[in-house]
Amino acid sequence: MVDLLSYREPRCHVPRSSGASSDRGGSPHATQDLLTQNRHQYALHLHRCTKSPALQLRGAFRLPGHPSDSPLHESARLVKGFWVSKYIADASARSALEAAAGYADRAGVPVPFVWSGAQWTTPGGEWRDWPLIRRGMGEWLRAVVAGLDAAGSDGERREEVQRHMRDARFAAFHAIDPDDKQWHTDVAEGLARDLAAIPAPVHAAPSLVRDLRSVASEIESASDARATQLLSLASQFEAFRAPLNDPASWVRNLGAAPYGTHVRTSAVWEAFATAEPVLARSLGTVTGKRALFAAMDVRFGARRKLSGYEGWRGVALSE
């Protein structure tokens, strides 16, 4: 018999025990009942006691909660091996991240890092070290979980505020004194503003909250390869992607200047890269300049030679 809590080997084979068919109360189903009752705790202990990515087990085991004075020497016998994964399943992780994208407002803070198409950056396009990105995303997901946990109390608050708001409106409707009517009306309007500030109730399944916690923990503490894989799954959803605008939208916001004022192409590209760093990096220098200069030609006319360099007349670059 194997003591599960002290197990450390990646593979364990235990000979059959003659006491496997005995039970405490004479029921032939006692072993199976005990396995069914403890299956969740059994898997939890396997996850805690395993250091390898996966563990193949077969043999006899004493499950947590097995009575020490029981004549049943084994809690369960596994005649075929199986694999216990070290990480959450990718499908569950993707579903959890999709839900986190939908409940992004529950975190109370914006997403600290976004996928620009080439790398993870701050929403402003600034680079950060990989450990800081992992910690920031993990903490943000935990904030989403905390917001979902508070959804129940938010529902109770909304009901209470709605009740007081109805009472105030009822009192204002039946008030005779104009001052009393105005006072109750102001109270009802203030409660309406408070009600709008309370998040709408969300009914998240406990399994979803549990998966979100697992994803946050793995992003923070798992291997770099696993964290990269999870963040790659997150980059599929718009909530985790940097907004990519058309360079033409930036050109449309440029002001006009006297015809004698001219700017060179290099100055326009520098101004664009400063104003839209994420978009400039995602497009790249060659593709970005081609798209930007084409938009400039449409609005300010074709480029021309100006004192030895190409540029446009009548362009006022934003400061």
Image (tube, grey):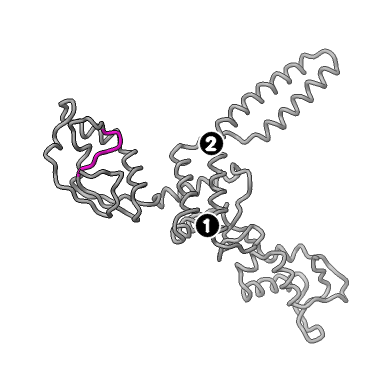
Residue 115 appears in which quarter of the rendering?
Answer: bottom right
Residue matched to label 2: 149
Q: Which residues are magenta?
A: 60-66
Residue 69 lies, in percent from the top left, at 22, 30
Pick whichever of labels 1 and 2 is earlier in the sequence: 2
Residue matched to label 1: 235
Q: Residue at x 82, y 12 (%)?
A: 176
Identify whether 258 is placed above or below 105.
below
Q: Residue at x 28, y 44 (%)?
A: 4
Within 10 Å of disc 2 (Cα), the crowding (few <14, some 14-19, many 20+) is: some
What kind of element bears circle 1? loop
What kind of element bears circle 2? helix
Q: Residue at x 54, y 38 (%)?
A: 148
Q: CA distance from mark 1 to mark 2?
A: 25 Å
Front residue of 283 and 216: 216
- Please check the rendered image and state whether residue 212 is part of the magenta-colored stretch, yes or no: no
Residue 258 lies, in percent from the top left, at 88, 71
Q: Is residue 143 left or right of residue 34?
A: right
Residue 289 lies, in percent from the top left, at 67, 74
Q: Amino acid at mark 1?
A: Ser
Q: Amino acid at mark 2?
A: Asp
- Please check the rendered image and state whether residue 61 is part of the magenta-colored stretch, yes or no: yes
Front residue of 70 and 268: 70
Q: Residue at x 62, y 68 (%)?
A: 281
